[in-house]
Image (cartoon, rainbow, N blue to C red):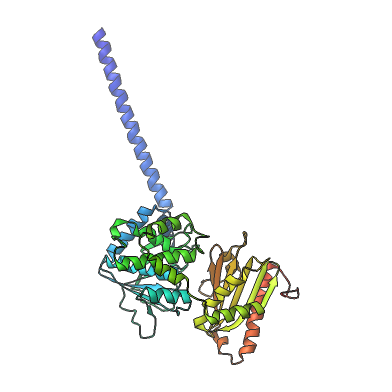
Amino acid sequence: MHGKKGSASLSTSTDMKKIREKEAELIKLKNKVKAQNSSKSKEPSEGAELEKDVESNTAAEPEDRTSHLVKTLEMARGKRLLICIKGYPDPDNIATSLALSHMCSGFEIQSTIVHFDQISHHENRALVKKLDLDIEEYSEQFDYTSYDYFAINDSQNTELPIKIPETCELLVFVDHHKKLGSVKGHFVDIRETAGSTSAIYGEYLTDSRFGFSGDSMEGSRIATALMHGIRSDTDNFVNAMPIDYKASEFLSKFVDKDLLSLISRQSIPAKTMDLTQIALQRKDIRGTFMFSGVGYVREEDRDGIGQCADYLLNREGIDTVVVYGVVGGEFVDGSLRTKSHVLDPDKWIKDVFGQDQHGVFYGGGRKDKGGFQIPLGVFGKCSDRELLWILIKKTIDELFYNKIGVEDSESAGD
């Protein structure tokens, strides 16, 4: 009797075990079907697929991003890469272009750094000269058709002033500004949590797979350039984020401090001083805003517009400054500086000037500064420069007044 009871108990135990196994299999099957249905419902369209890639890449951990970059460069091994500096070259995009070129050399990628606008700022000219950087200014003789890929750093979009072949794909796109739509590229890293693009590259270089060392002259040049890029784009670390400090800690071991000091202490050009005087004479104060149209500016003096805005922002009672002028007879170029806690330069400029027919915004910005560039088009051919400037100034000023909600007749300046 006792033996039969034990046998029945064993049979029941075996049956229960089988039931639990079947239940587990059923749960697994349900989860698998649920996952497949979820995947189908979330399957992106051709346009949305890119957005998904960008989001996942941006949200990835640092080591995941760097691994993705390593795989991307490995994929392009032995190819030719055109590293494009958009807009007027500044410390951040110059330094990151130099760093990317160095990283590419470890994967036998032949790279060329090209810029389309003149290097006008005195600090930037000093950076290129003192570090003996190998960057090339674009000309009509430049052959860009032989490149397999192109790369862009420190820019909100991929628009280039040249038409490159469709076979030339975007290999790398790294930026720290607000994202504008989707970017189609093999490696995309957009981080608004960084105060500079140089800091992002500093993070990449901490990875041993790039073999970065400050023992060599080239390593010291790159570290110095990136440190200058971080310092410049964070306003001497006033607007620095954790990644900027972390990258600076790593780079500081390799920086040529004497050279960095020399680059940072260049004297202000006489033309910039003259431009500042003009900006002061033509200032237009509306509440806490100050606007100043400085007229016609030579292309090589364009960076003086931003420096004027920096200086005017020091005036008591002013928290936002916009300085603009006609640069090179082709564009209305402007710079915005603010210490307002509520004004978003990026949104403010986009709201004022909008987009062109291709959907590209005329300007943008970040935490405390921004800029815009509006082509004159056929109006640039006007022979009466004085009349043209009156028209430009009236139009720009009215846009500003409408944005801040004041009438043109209200008292201004002193």
Residue in the foreground of this view, choosing between 32 and 381: 381
Horizontal and vertical percent position of residue 364 = 54, 68
Residue at far bottom of view:
383
- Could one spot residue 182 in this view of the protein? no
Residue at far front of view:
258
Residue 183 higher or lower than 378, as above or below = above
Horizontal and vertical percent position of residue 301 = 52, 81
Residue at x-position 46% and y-position 69%: 157
In the picture, the quarter occupied by the N terminus is: top left
Residue 245 higher or lower than 335, as above or below = above
Horizontal and vertical percent position of residue 101 = 33, 69
Residue at far left of view:
3
Is residue 386 rendered to the left or right of residue 256?
Answer: right
- Could one spot residue 6 in this view of the protein? yes
Residue at x-position 40% and y-position 53%: 60
Residue in the foreground of this view, choosing between 161 and 7: 161
